Amino acid sequence: MKHLLNNNQDIASGRFSNLKSNFINDPSLFSDYKKVIDEHLRDGIIERIKDSDENKENTYYLPHRAVIRKDHSTTQLRIVFDASSHAKGQLSLNDCLYTGLNLISDLFSLLLRFRSHPVAISSDIQKAFLQINIEEGDRNFTRFYWSNNPEDDNKEIYRMTTVLFGVFSSPFLLAVTAKYHLKRCIEQFPMTHELLENSLYVDDLITGPENIESAFKSSLEAFNIVKDVSMNLRKWETNSVELRDRWRKERLEIDESNYSVNDNSALTPFKVLGLPWDSDLDIFYFETLNLEKFLSRRINTKRYNLLVAGRIFDPL
């Protein structure tokens, strides 16, 4: 890698200058972005590079941007790094990485299993990618620029210490890490081990036990298995009121959006792998409010029609 990969510093610097201009024009974007950076720094997810290390060889600088998902009930701004960025005639970081085997469950089969049992359960691993450390010798390939003052010409250099969004190998690294740790619980929790093996889609747990007792037992065991490797299963949701009440007594973090398809409220819809799910009515549905706003632009082009179609996500 060190002989082929250019450091991409000029590209990253130019992209960061553009980002700072966006911050100046949109102070609320800067405020939200800075909150994420400060949180990552506090949690050790990123670290600042000392000035003496600034010109260290074998480095790569990542441009980054905000992806804002207003349909998410928790973190709505996520910082995504562009590991495919490169100068003309140069390789990107993604070009130099092994993507890894596809260990992710089939989406179609997973959703069918989710709907084939009386009790439905959904949960996700909090900041799953960011819980996996990068070897210190590889961290200089995840450098990026940041400044706490967008109007200041100076910028500081940081680097990731954990697996990051935007790198082709990240889904494989998460999946193989999960499978490695799950092997330890085969003998103690054979049923829950099988459930986790077959019901994880990246960082989402989507499953459907036969009855409430089995669902309660499996969910508690799954929570503790994941907790043992310093991760957190959160945003629990189910179509069972009884199971939800039992989770509350065990202090599991439940998604409390209480959004209903029959509601005209501004609450964020709860989604299962991208599909809005009304857990009380136990149905999937299409959320049309934002789609109607988009359609109101009435642009008669093929590109626009494809964009409209792309907003209707239906893996089934």
Image (cartoon, rainbow, N blue to C red):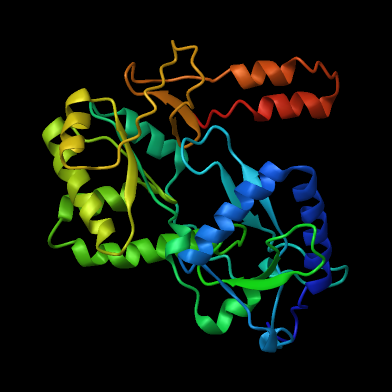
Task: State the image quarter where residue 177 is shown.
Answer: bottom left
How far across and down, in percent of the image, does residue 185 sit? 19, 62
**How many numbered circles does the render carry?**
0
Name which quarter of the figure residue 181 lies in: bottom left
Q: State the residue at coordinates (17%, 50%).
A: 191
Residue at image location 71% in from the left, 24% down from the top? 308
Quadrant of res 190: bottom left
In the rendered view, tell whether residue 51 sits above or below residue 273: below
Tell me residue 228's x, y (percent): 24, 63
> Could you say where residue 170 lies in the image, as x and y percent from the top left?
53, 62
Q: Is residue 163 visible?
A: no
Q: Tell me: 109 left or right of 314.
A: left
In this rendering, does residue 120 appear at all? yes
The quarter of the image holding the N terminus is bottom right
Q: Name above or below for residue 294 compared with residue 130.
A: above
Residue 30: x %, y % from top left = 68, 49
The residue under the point 22% across, 67% down is: 184
- In the picture as drawn, the residue positioned furthest to the right comes out as 88
Residue 268 shown left or right of residue 223 in the figure: right
Position of residue 66 relative to residue 93, above or below, is above
Q: Residue at x 76, y 63 (%)?
A: 85
Please tell me which residue lies in front, 39 or 100.
39
Seen from the viewer's position, the closer of residues 49 and 70 is: 49
